Amino acid sequence: MTATTNTAATTNTVDHATYTAVAQFLAHEARLLDEGREQEWFELLDDDLLYTVPSRQSTEPRSAEINRNAWRIRDTKAHVRTRIARQNTGKAYSEVPPSRTMRLVGSIEVAATTEPDVVEAHSSLLLYRQRGIDVHFDLIPCRRNDRIRLTDAGPRLLAREVILTETSIKTANLGVFL
Amino acid sequence: MTTTHEPHSAFATPLDALLDRVEKDMQDDLVPAEIFNNDEVFRAEMERIFTTTWVFVAHETEIPNAGDFVQRKIGLDPVIVTRDGKGGINVLSNYCRHRGTQVCQTDAGNSRFFTCPYHGWTYANDGKLVGTPLMHRAYGQPLDPEQWGLKRAAKVATRNGFVFAALSDDVPPLDEWLGGAGWMLDVITQLHPDGMRVAGPPERYIVNGDWKTAGENFAGDVYHLPTLHTSIQEVEMIEGLQGTCEIARTYEFENGHTFIGHAWTEAIGPFFTHWGYGALEGYTEHFDLSGFDETQKFVAEHQPPTVGTIFPNLSFIRIFSPLPDGPPGVFTSFRQWQPVAPGKLELWNWQFVWKFQDEESAQRDYVGGQYCFGSAGLYEQDDTVAWEGVQRAAASPWMRKEGMKFNYQQGNNSPVDQTPDPDWKGPGIHRNTGYGEHVQFNFLRQWLRTMKGDRA
């Protein structure tokens, strides 16, 4: 692939320290979620969070696959707070006991934006999930387009767009954060 | 294998003997578990139900323009639902007439033609065969475009924009088939004469539950709310779950179509009319119920349907709900339980909004609806997982050996008065309680009638 096809990554390059901080952040939040530490994860969300899972269908041209005006999920921070509160009731039965998960985060690209304290991060996520007494497991493959705010207290998730690889998903629900 | 030894015979039940057993057990308000996960039952359902009855395929607002199409399912069969150049709606088999390869590989789009990738047979979006490569050498003259067109559903008809198709000529007219369910569909979607539209394409996901389990749940299983959905009450997005059966009202129609509603104005207050739309800004001032009969007006205002199932596999839900990020909303979802395999379905979920709503209001109801009912819905996450157990029990060797039957005996056991409302002026049967499991049985009786080949 030629360099000209990937101008975003080359012209908006961030320094090594920023890349490392963002990559560490993505790894850390994945571990918090895998370890059932949702409340600590919640502290890493920016107050202006927008977390979306847009619709994906099989289409031609391929560029029409993602419909950003249609969603499985379109959450603000308040929505996420209530999701976590519901899980914490111990009566959100599809997650009693919570799924055992392993989030594999990779292919991380970080780019500067026009806002000095905000970077873009693109990553792929493969979420392994085994629920309850299931002997089988679910895989949720997706890509994530994030906007991350760099604050004095550390990176904060400002926006996450989850592009599911599948049009029809094979897991029982999206009761786990991606 | 011996056929005289009792326990063994449970494993070798011919389908028709099983159906006879189901009929007998249902007289005692019992249902053999195995119907919810059985290869023979499933195959028969695909043949005896899905090729013989009206099945929902699309809403007209999904294909508003000439050339628009969506790919759908009738049972296991992929169909293309198209809007042709004359404005007509076509429901076409997605199997090429030459060798069967699927001529459409996308979920939605706009195209005048569908070309098979195998040998290039090309069809217009009304199904006619319009091209065969190397025609002069391969066939000498054009093949008959009608005879060799894509197979068409025998019947296609619409009600309030809902497109239904039947793969058999031997069906009653759609409005007759829907009967009371059509009357109720008017109540749900015609509060404004312009009606409703899909808010977006359907989201789809696999549920390890049988399509009938989903159908009977949405026929009106309000009994599960205080248990399965108690977490929703604890985060203050609903209240009074313990009273759900007390304030529920059933609507049992012919052909298995079934709805259940709640007496909201009685339970919450006189302001809480029309599903709770009456308590919100921006809805009831647009409503025009002048086309409704008196009973429809009463139902819409005071005891509107909360959920319902149109046999075989189209269901509906409309609920009022507080939201974490602002004022409450009222959400409308239609969903289809697409059978995939015994004990396995694919859920197709559409949020609907009113055509009169502006973009901001429509988006709010769309997003709020997904927050409650959808793959990440706070309610639905738990429903779909609970349904997994039904089909597992149904396939259990031990339970089959035991001949396990599920208990649908609330009707006889409950001391609550469940007699049909003698003053009911609408179609079908109306009961003033959610106790009794009558709604689930109305759905399952139609299933049994259809499986046995009886005409309703």
Image (tube, coloured by chain):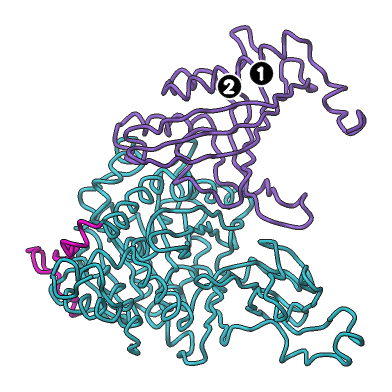
Chain colours: A purple, B cyan
Chain of the residue that carries numbered disc 2 in the rendered image: A
Instruction: Name the residue at the front extreme.
Output: B1
Circle 1 Cα neighbour tier, 10 Å, few/some/many (<14 / 14–19 / ≥20): many
Left or right side of B449 for B53: right
Q: Earlier in the sequence, mark 1 or mark 2?
A: 2
Image: B454 above or below A94? below
- The numbered dot on residue A62 is none
Residue B212 makes an appearance in the image: yes
Amino acid bearing label 2: Asp
Location of the C terminus of chain A by quadrant is top right
Image position, residue B47 (x, y; %)? 45, 79
Q: Position of residue B135 (x, y in %)?
A: 88, 84
- Element class at badge 1: strand
CA neighbours of label 2 inside 10 A, class few (<14), some (14 to 19), many (20+)? some
Residue picked out by circle 2: A46
Determine the secondary structure under disc 2. strand
Chain part drawn in magenta: B397-422
Nearest to the observer: residue A171 or residue B158: A171
Instruction: Check disc 1 and report the residue beneath it.
Output: A149
Q: Quadrant of residue B246?
A: bottom left
| Cβ atoms at labels 1 and 2 below 8 Å apart | yes
Residue B304 visible to an observer of this rendering? no
Q: Residue placed at 66% from the left, 75% from the top?
A: B95
- Residue at (27% x, 65% y) in the render: B34
Figure check: A116 above or below B48? above
Label 1 is placed on what type of residue? Arg
Picture layout, residue B428 above or below residue A22: below
Point out residue B386 in the picture as x, y percentages from the top left corner. Answer: 32, 49
The picture places residue B258, in percent across and down from the top left corner, at 33, 72
Q: CA distance from mark 1 to mark 2?
A: 8 Å
In the image, taking residue B212 as reference, residue B2 lies left or right, namely left
